[in-house]
Image (cartoon, rainbow, N blue to C red):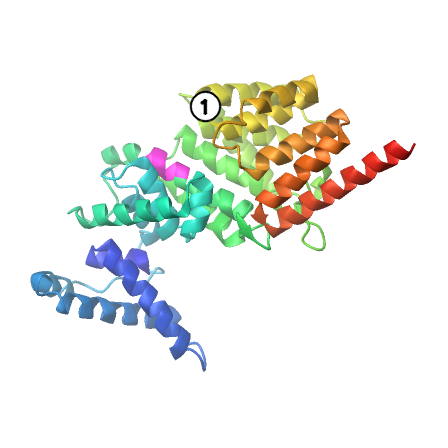
Amino acid sequence: MLGALTRRWGDFAACEDAVQEALFAAVTAWADGVPDDPQAWLTRVAQRRLVDYYRSDLARRRREEQVTRAEPPPSPEVGHSDDTLVLLLLCCHPSLTPASAVALTLRAVGGLTTTEIARAFLVPEKTMAQRISRAKQRLREQDDLFALPPDEALPERLRIVLHVLYLIFNEGYTSTSGDGLHRVELSAEAIRLTRMLAALRPGNAEVSGLLALMLLTDARRPARTGPSGELVPLAEQDRTLWDGDLVAEGAALAAEAMAGHPLGEYALQAAIAAVHDRAPSSAATDWRQVLALYEALERLSGNPVVSLNKAVAVAMVNGPAAALELLAALDSGPLAQSHRLDAVRAHLHEMAGDLSAAAEAYVRAAERTTNLTERDYLTLRAAQARRKFAANFIR
């Protein structure tokens, strides 16, 4: 809806407000039943809100006449363009800073809340709300038509678009909050949009790499939770439950991406995922290859999350003591208050046999996560470490 309305009316902020008002109206109007065509109902209400908005603004009467003469927007089932993809590219407009473009797209296309976006960027919620507001204002000042940019203009937006899709997928695969581990609709939408980009930019190594990474990661989702929805870590997953078709498609795309030039971050991440997915068990994983890929990725990206993940590979190759030394460098960075840093530290202490330190780190990680499934898992691991420590102490 938002994509179709913005394509017709051109005012992103006004169309977003109209969509929200239409949804609020539906809460009351649909109390006794949903109409036969919910999208058409919502679109009509949103259109009326927009007409009222323009009529109330004398300075925009000329624009009102132009848009009322325009052809009505086609339904999503008609035509060859996808309004969601166009909206995605609009949100990654060159006039926006990369940070603002990512935030706005996550809000408008990904459907994430401001709180979720703030957590993804490790910034306060108020800061993120201001960033999104400024991005909307900047788009309002642009005169560009709401349409796919020409081929020569697409590469400059591609890097931001890929990062946005990556964050949307991550939020779907491991939700930052709530009582469920997954938000399948988000990860599925990220995969759908990335497939569109792959069709739009065939042969692009980073697009292929991102799609491969998503498919290889999503292939594990059926085994990632137990019968009661509890988290099952990668090392303990029943790999027969993994989606073999997604693994095969993702591995082929990963190989294609690694053969591309220049080598990019998503191609390397996809290669790491492919090593994990091809291994018949955690013990049979080629950890030396995983470590080599993480080292290359760390040099390329400088991302602290990559350094955190590399520490696990270091522990598997060189032992937990070496990995714990690496984590010390992350204590003063953006991950200092992240539950993931505490969770990895707890795992490494457990590997080293320091069960008391492991239990303390698991407790800190559980206190810092806002996802209930992760919290339950980390709390359980803390209790298990304490029981083992007590048993060893008694002996």
Give yes or no for residue 117 being in the magenta stretch. Answer: no
Magenta stretch: dominant secondary structure: helix
Residue located 37% across and 68% down the image = 23
Of residues 71 and 137, the one drawn nearer to the viewer in this rendering: 137
| Residue 11 appears left or right of 303 | left
Which quadrant would the N terminus be assigned to in this image?
bottom left
Q: Residue furthest right?
A: 395
Which quadrant would the C terminus be assigned to in this image?
top right
Q: Is residue 255 above or below residue 134?
A: above
Give yes or no for residue 162 being in the magenta stretch. Answer: yes
Residue 266 locus on image (x, y percent): 46, 30
Q: Amino acid at mark 1?
A: Gly
Whether residue 37 is visible, yes or no, is no
Residue 181 locus on image (x, y percent): 59, 50
| Residue 5 appears left or right of 141 | right
Question: What residue is disc 1 on?
Answer: 302
Of residues 120 and 250, the one drawn nearer to the viewer in this rendering: 120
Residue 165: image quadrant is top left
Q: Residue furthest bottom?
A: 32
Whether residue 48 is visible, yes or no, is yes
Q: Magenta residues?
A: 158-163
Residue located 49% across and 24% down the image = 258
Residue 70 locus on image (x, y percent): 16, 62
| Residue 391 appears left or right of 185 | right
